[in-house]
Amino acid sequence: MNDELIILASQLFDEGRIEHFLAYRKGTVKFKTTPLIARTKKDLQGLWMDDFCASNLTLYLKEIKGRVGIVVKGCDSRSLVSLLKEGQVKREDLYVVGLPCPGQIDLRKVQSALACEREDLEEINRRGPQILIRVNGQEKALQKSQAFLDKCLACQYPKPLFFDHLLPGEYVSPLEEAKFPGDELRKKSVLGKWTFWAEQFERCIRCYACRNICPACFCPRCVVEENLPQWVSPLPTRGDNFVFHMMRMMHVAGTCVSCGECQRVCPMEIPLMKLNEKMTDDLRELFGFMAGVDLNVPLPFRTFSQEDPNDFIK
Amino acid sequence: MRDRAEVLGPAKENGLWTFRRFDGLDLLRGFQNSRLPVKALFLEPLRPLFEWKQQGDSPELYSFPPAGDERLIFGIRSCDARALRILGPVFARDHQDALYLKNLSRTLLLGEACRVQCEGSFCGEMGIDPQDSGDCDIFFREIAEEYVAKVLTERGEALIGEGDFFGEATEEQWRSARGEIRGSGKKPLFELETVRVRAAERFSEGELWQRVSAKCINCGVCTYLCPTCYCFDLCDLQTPNRAVRFRRWDSCAFSDFTGMAVHNPREEKWRRYRQRVSHKFNFFFQNFQAIACVGCGRCVAHCPVNLDLREVLLEVAG
């Protein structure tokens, strides 16, 4: 697969169809690959893809303009749909290569299920429905549902929604039937929810990794950095952190495709996807909308409708 | 100690290691280094400095003095302890920072030897021995049911004299308590002196810095998780009759870090990334004769895009 892709990308460079190629290369820490941003054929040498291609590379389309070749998993392709709708990329500038994905490992889930540290994990292999893991020399097995990212358990789009080339492999969801993990938090009272989030946001350090990794956060200047007026204080207090995260979530409503990168990269392990999932569900219930699946359906927060049930907008 | 001081030790909360008030009896074994460096307890992420209030006709100023209570932190790793010493002159040489210095002087530092090499770490390359430290008051090595301790300061000496917990140990016992470190033993990745010299020589090679920073996403993970990054900003929280000035962490990775009214000298991210590396391995050395990195590996392990400082240093040295 890697060789095939190197040949393909080299051709694209040769033919002048692309100026950049976005793929993966081997990571320097266990169970991770790292983004590869190739500007020339020579840069393709390190190209490497395995079962740990968790990153959503579409994030770099914020920065890398012009003709770009990009490798996407099914879920990542939803970000492309969103970016096309928002006018952030042009279809004719993209050369989209589909990558088959066996489901991505959630290292935090694995660590918690096996009560171990990241340093203890020696090997992770997929074997049928099981994930075999060597921890400090001992073999352990987990079910996919115990080891995969939530988004992979709910995977409905294993195959990119559009592409120019598909790499060989199986484009199937990791679970035969998509399983949407329930969120116990929803059942709690407002006070219960507040208590939960107050504790979570208490430890936010405002590193903005969630915002910066997000393909849907493409504003050249974020409202967080505005100081005339200052919409949100830069102080990492519980209240300001809360405002920041709520504002960010509302801002990406309709373009967030639940890729889960914000939660995956949060160094303080704040379960941000609980917010995004709630927002996604609300959009589905209130507007019958699902982000990043149909180019022709307008974005709910960018659309005026005469039939809007709320009369304040008329 | 608990009778007269705040005692903090490693605890796992919400999936990450941190330092928390220790109320237990049994010391924890097998803990990993904290996600945020122990620096966060000395240069806090957020710290009020002073307050202004309108009282009747006249404004009044109040300051938030440094906390004076004695404090003991145990379970500190050699890397983080060294980092506190590296930061010392920043807050003491040209300007006396009462807050940082008071935090240092009020705290007893109890270190503990590592038994596992942290993901991403390169402490060896940075001249840190994960099983020994000269930067704590007492340093512990774990053995079967006990610890062997090395007392390094008078304060440490006073502490062990207090209770009935410590017996005499021999030099040989201390030596043999040096255990294996799981996951280590690889040969050094780079030679620090070469990195330092080359970082200075190659400062103006824009192409190099553009290449190594290409995938950086400009977030603050590497700087905020770093035990030796110390940049901060001053921010005010204002209401009509009251205002508080805070100090908060800031990061050179942020696009507006050096933004001024008409100009930002580090508009592009490669200039900001170059600043981070150069500050640690070049400028800081020029100013304080030390390298501002202890190789703890947090920036490597937690970078959202696995932009590995070790790889960058190798490239710079090459």
Image: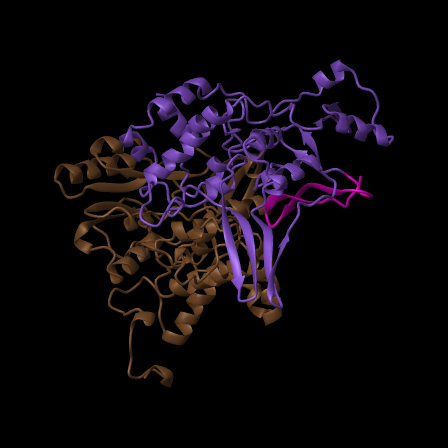
Q: Is residue A48 left or right of residue B19?
A: left
Which chain is assigned brown?
A
Q: Colour scheme used in the picture?
A: by chain
Using the image, determine if residue B41 lies above or below residue B295.
below
Quarter where residue B143 is shown: top right
In this view, the residue farthest toward the right is B164
Q: Is residue B110 highlighted in magenta?
A: no
Q: Nearer the viewer, residue B263 or A153?
A: B263
What percent of the width, then of the height, locates residue B253?
41, 42
Using the image, determine if residue A289 lies above or below residue B157.
below
Q: Residue placed at 60% from the left, 67% from the top? A: B57
In this view, the residue farthest toward the left is A15
What percent of the width, then of the height, locates residue A305?
29, 80
Q: Nearer the viewer, residue B90 or B185?
A: B90
What percent of the width, then of the height, locates residue B150?
73, 23
Give, as a single range, the part of the protein colored magenta: B1-26
What percent of the width, then of the height, locates residue A152?
43, 53
Residue A27 at least partly seen: no
Q: Nearer the viewer, residue A57 or B194?
A: B194
Q: Residue placed at 49% from the left, 62% from the top? A: A243
Q: Is residue B160 left or right of residue A66?
A: right
Q: Is residue A172 left or right of residue B288?
A: left
In this view, the residue farthest toward the front is B57
Q: Is residue B23 highlighted in magenta?
A: yes
- Quarter occupied by the C terminus of chain B: top left
- Quarter occupied by the N terminus of chain B: top right
Q: Is residue A59 left or right of residue B13?
A: left
Q: Residue placed at 31% from the left, 38% from the top? A: A36
Q: Nearer the viewer, residue A250 or B44?
A: B44
Look at the image and give the colour of chain B.
purple
